[in-house]
Image (cartoon, grey):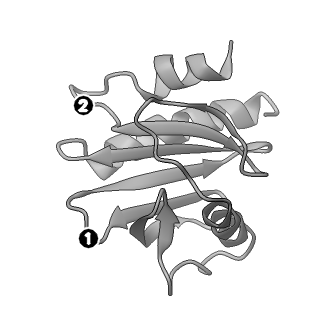
Amino acid sequence: MSWQSYIDEHLMDEIEGNYLSAAAIIGHDGSVWAQSATFPQVKPEEITGIMNDFDNPGSLAPTGLFLGGIKYMVIQGEGGVVIRGKKTMQGPGGVTIKKTGMSLVVGIYDEPMTPGQCNLVVERLGDYLVEQGL
C-alpha cells in the first residue's frame, strides 16, 4: 500500500459522519511522505519542536504546538507516543499526532468532528504502522 493510500483510505475516510480536515504522514526528519490536499505547509522548526516533545514530554506545553503556522494548546496525550492539541485562536478544532518508529501520523480536525473521533482515526493507523515495524 502506498503512503498516499493510507491518507486517502484511512485518515481522510468518514467516521461517524465526520471527516478530518487535513492529514499527513511525515518522517521523523520532517519530510512529508504523503498528505491530503488541505494539509498546511509545515516548517522544519515545527517538526523539530514536535519531535523534541516526543523525546521530552511536556516541552511544548509552555509555548504551544505550531503546525502550518497555527498554534495549538497541548492537551492530554501519551508521553513519547501521542501529542494532542486544541486550536487557540482560529476557532474550534485541534490536532492529534501519533509517533511511529519511522513517522508521525498527523490528523487535523474542525467541528463537528470531535477530539475523540480524530484520536481514534489517527491512533488506529499509527498503532497499525507500529505493529508493521514502520
Residue type, numbered disc 2: Asn
Q: In which quarter of the image is residue 60?
A: bottom right
At 54% from the left edge and 52% from the top edge, which residue is drawn? Answer: 97
What kind of element bears circle 1?
Answer: loop
Task: Report the residue marked by disc 1.
Answer: 89
Q: Where is residue 86 in the image (x, y as percent from the top left)?
A: 34, 64
Q: Position of residue 37 (x, y in %)?
A: 44, 29
Q: Where is residue 33 in the image (x, y as percent from the top left)?
A: 68, 33
Mark 1 touches mark 2? (CB < 8 Å): no
Q: Please rate how many residues cluster around mark 1, counting C-alpha atoms within 10 Å: few if below 14, some from 14 to 19, many from 20.
A: few
Q: Where is residue 130 in the image (x, y as percent from the top left)?
A: 73, 37
At 63% from the left edge and 64% from the top edge, which residue is drawn? Answer: 50
Q: Is residue 82 left or right of residue 96?
A: right
Q: What whole-number distance in Å separates the C-alpha atoms at marks 1 and 2? A: 22 Å
At 26% from the left edge and 70% from the top edge, which residue is drawn? Answer: 89
31, above or below 14, in the image: below
Q: In which quarter of the image is the N terminus?
A: top right
State the mark number for residue 18. 2
Q: In this rendered view, identify the residue nearer to me: 3 or 40.
A: 40
At 21% from the left edge and 58% from the top edge, which residue is drawn? Answer: 92
